Amino acid sequence: MNITKEQVLEALKNVEDPDLKKDLVTLGMIKDLEVIGKNVDFTVVLTTPACPMKEMIHKACVNAVLHYIDEEAIVNVKMSSNVTARKNSGPMLPNVKNIIGVASGKGGVGKSTVASNLALALVKLGASVGLVDADIYGPSQTIMFDVMDATPMSKEIDGVSKMMPIESFGVKLLSIGFFVDTAQALVWRGPMASKAVVQLFQEAHWGELDYMIIDLPPGTGDIHLSLVGAVPLNGVVIVSTPQFVALADAKKGVGMFQLPSINVPVLGIVENMSYFSPPDEPEKRYYIFGKDGAKKLAEELEVPLLGEIPLVQSICEAGDSGKPAVLDYNTPQATAYMEMARKVAQQVSIQNAKEPIVKVADVKW
């Protein structure tokens, strides 16, 4: 007997999205279903190209048709994606689907390195990505993307002059480093620094993006408050190293975003400089700064552990040379960054399903 579309849809109701906890048919993720005889073709539209469950969902769809309908069916499943978007309650960045802050409780933990590699990993996975270097007193993304000598141009958009981000490795980038002498200390009071950061969003033409990554300053202060009061964040990624002193400050950073007046979801924690593996003995791991510190903190705070990035000299060298480490294919560090990016995208999709409307924080301090 020939297979019908109705039979296929009924079978696929047995395949659940592991993150959203509903079946693919109910979620509207099955598209372009065609059935000719025993040939079954359809597309599964995931919520992000970085979905870490892609292969598992593909296999489950094929097995569902074979098990519930006909074991002789010829099943062709195409995997596509349409990044879920936050519903912005204000006019800021209407064409940017998701905005993710990368923060740390203290400096020196590799937050900017994580932010740059996260942005590039998402590009490698097929997403359109922008990066704002909001670390106003210590901008470093111009170095990490090898665009120190670039100057953003302006373009008239709907009668208004807008800054055009610089593009490097497929990432659209703006930084205060493009507009000040990076050899000189930036001596600005809090309100001036905060205004400069907000201008990177308000006065730029970002176009359509799946993800915007914001490299936030370390600590908690004026810039953070101004930003969450102006830009609707889907969530933040907290970066720490395994030491107790770094974890204590990371916990404070989490606490700031979880304040009722701010209420920005914490997507999870990334442990940077997690372990050292000698180049000639990659199977060995030495936990120089302690073991499982971020893992334990994530469990305590009930947030995901998004990644454990190894301590590798080439990560530093790659950032200094303007070619972030995730570009170096088939290395442990590139693999770690790609896995981290998949988990971040996964948490954004989950958050969008739980809280589809994203508001700016009601900060009156």
Image: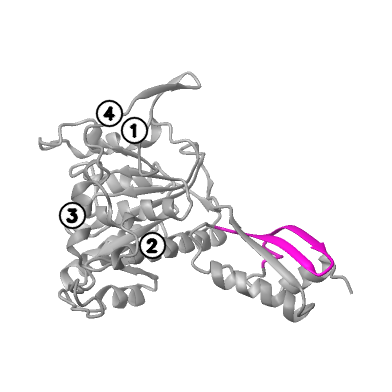
* Mark 1 Cα-neighbour bin, 10 Å: few <14, some 14–19, many ≥20: few
* Tag nearer the camera, 4 or 3: 3
In space, the residues marked 1 and 4 are separated at their CA atoms by: 16 Å
Numbered circle sitting on residue 338: 2
Please, what secondary structure does the residue beneath circle 1 have?
A: helix
Q: Is residue 17 visible?
A: no
Image location of residue 200, percent across then percent down: 34, 35
Determine whether, in the image, residue 35 is placed left or right of residue 256.
right
- Identity, as a three-letter code, of the amino acid under mark 1: Gln
Q: Amino acid at mark 3?
A: Glu
Camera-nearest label, 1 or 4: 4
Q: What's drawn in magenta, residue-wise?
A: 24-47
Q: Disc number at residue 72?
A: none
The image's mark for residue 317 is: 3
Question: Residue 303: which quarter of the image?
Answer: bottom left
The disc label shown at residue 199, or none: 1
- Where 136 sits versus 289, above or below? above
Q: Residue at x 35, y 66 (%)?
A: 335
Task: Identify which residue, 122 or 226, lies in the foreground.
Answer: 122
Residue that badge 4 annotates: 151
Q: Mark 3 and mark 2 in contact? Answer it, CB < 8 Å.
A: no
**Mark-to-mark CA distance, 3 and 2:** 19 Å
What's under tag 2, amino acid-wise? Met
Specify whether residue 231 is painted magenta.
no
Circle 3 SS class:
helix
**40 falls in the magenta region:** yes
